[in-house]
Amino acid sequence: MNTDSNKLISYIKIIAVILVFIICIGLLIFESYTLFIVYDEGNAVMPSNFGNFEKVRNILDDRPAKDEFSFAVIGDSRGYGALGYATFEEIMERLKDENLSFLVLLGDCVYKGTPYFHMYFKSEWSEELATKYPTFYLPGNHDIGKDFTLSEFEDQYGPAIFSFEHQGNLFIFLNVLPEPYTIDGSIAFLESMLPFDRSAYNKVFVFMHAPITVQSTHSTKKVIDGDKLFPLFKDLGVDYVYAGDYHGYFREEHDGIDYIVTGGGGAKLIKAKFGQFYHALIVTVRRDGGVFEEILQVAEARSLEDSMECLAMSEIYPFIKNNRILVIIINIAILLVLIFSYRIMYYCIRRFRNK
């Protein structure tokens, strides 16, 4: 083998060993970064104006009467898996300049119903996403699961079914999820409101995660007993029903009630589907009965910092926590590889220089 070939093989060996060395260093750095992020932000405390608790609803009682007021609605802000909330943050940045009475999150604010994805959500909300107005959070099918049950959701964020009055209007929040979940609790809550004095309110608004309207232009998941909600909404004189789940925008009128689907808060879009774009809704309600809707549209955004934080908190940290012995073994192996690769690099470089 000639000298040039020997030099090329030596170069390849050195580069390969350097790559292994860099990868091992990178793994140790990201593990340290994960532990630091969890230590620094993992126990974030949510603002006092977030959640469905009575104390949050009571904030609205102190507001003076107005000729008009506005609220915002965002659905499905969970982002692309472990890639963070960059698009959702763009929406929230725009909303911070709006004069709103409150904000409604229609669910699917996390990618998976685990304590770790909720830990990331709370860390982001307490630092970057927090609002100056009350924010209510309905559970979506991605927000709960076997590792984060509905009971745990309600312990941390307040009841999933509730209502309140504001500026002469009634706002009803229901726990409506696609199958296999049932909506028995929501049906019972609505039935408990009957008979109902509709004349006591200017408008009646309903919020829930999964829509019950289905058209060929957009796809929705089946809601068990969803048809039972239609007559109840009619008996209560509901004017508007807001739902998410579908990652886009759609509306239709059914029996004199406007059904609006708004799920463009940051989750992945399929742009070939009808009405899929990133957005929030701003709804203005006037004392004279007028209701006006503004679509606040934003472009898709990505953030390396958010992606790293989300991946660290929601995926890497639970692996470390649940596999501690394995992680120790892996770390020892990485250290041995580092020592071995360093010795090889040192030997190869000395040999290469002596030729």
Image: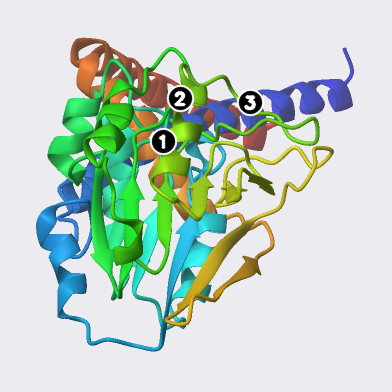
Residue type at mark 1?
Leu
User: Which residue appears at 22% of the width and 53% of the height?
Assistant: 51
**Looking at the image, is mark 2 or mark 3 nearer the viewer?**
2
For residue 335, say whether it is visible: yes
Which residue shows up at 33% across the image and 50% down it? 172
The x and y percentages for residue 131 are 32, 70
Q: Which residue corresponds to mark 3?
A: 16
Q: Nearer the viewer, mark 3 or mark 1?
A: 1
**Label disc, if present, on residue 228 of the rendered structure:** 2
Q: Percent from the top left, x then y, of residue 154? A: 18, 36
Q: Quadrant of residue 281?
A: bottom right
Quarter residue 213 falls in = top right
Badge 2 vs badge 1, beta-carbon distance below 8 Å: yes
Q: CA distance from mark 3 to mark 1?
A: 68 Å
Q: Look at the image and tell me whether residue 32 can be seen.
A: no
Q: Quadrant of the C terminus?
A: top right
Q: Is residue 53 above or below residue 111?
A: below
Q: Mark 2 or 3 closer to N-term?
A: 3
Q: Disc 1 on helix, strand or loop?
A: helix
Q: Position of residue 56 (x, y in %)?
A: 17, 62
User: Could you tell me which secondary element the residue under label 2 belongs to?
Assistant: helix
Discs 3, 1 touching: Cβ within 8 Å: no
- Image height check: is 101 above or below 300? below
Q: Which type of secondary structure does the marked residue at label 3 adopt?
A: helix
Q: What residue is disc 1 on?
A: 232
Nearest the eye: 185 or 257: 257
Mark 3 and mark 1 lie on one chain; the one further toward the N terminus is 3
- Specify the quadrant that holds the N terminus: top right
Residue at the far left in the pictured view: 55
Mark 3 belongs to which amino acid? Ala
Is residue 10 depicted above or below 1 in this figure?
A: below
Q: Is residue 71 left or right of residue 213?
A: left
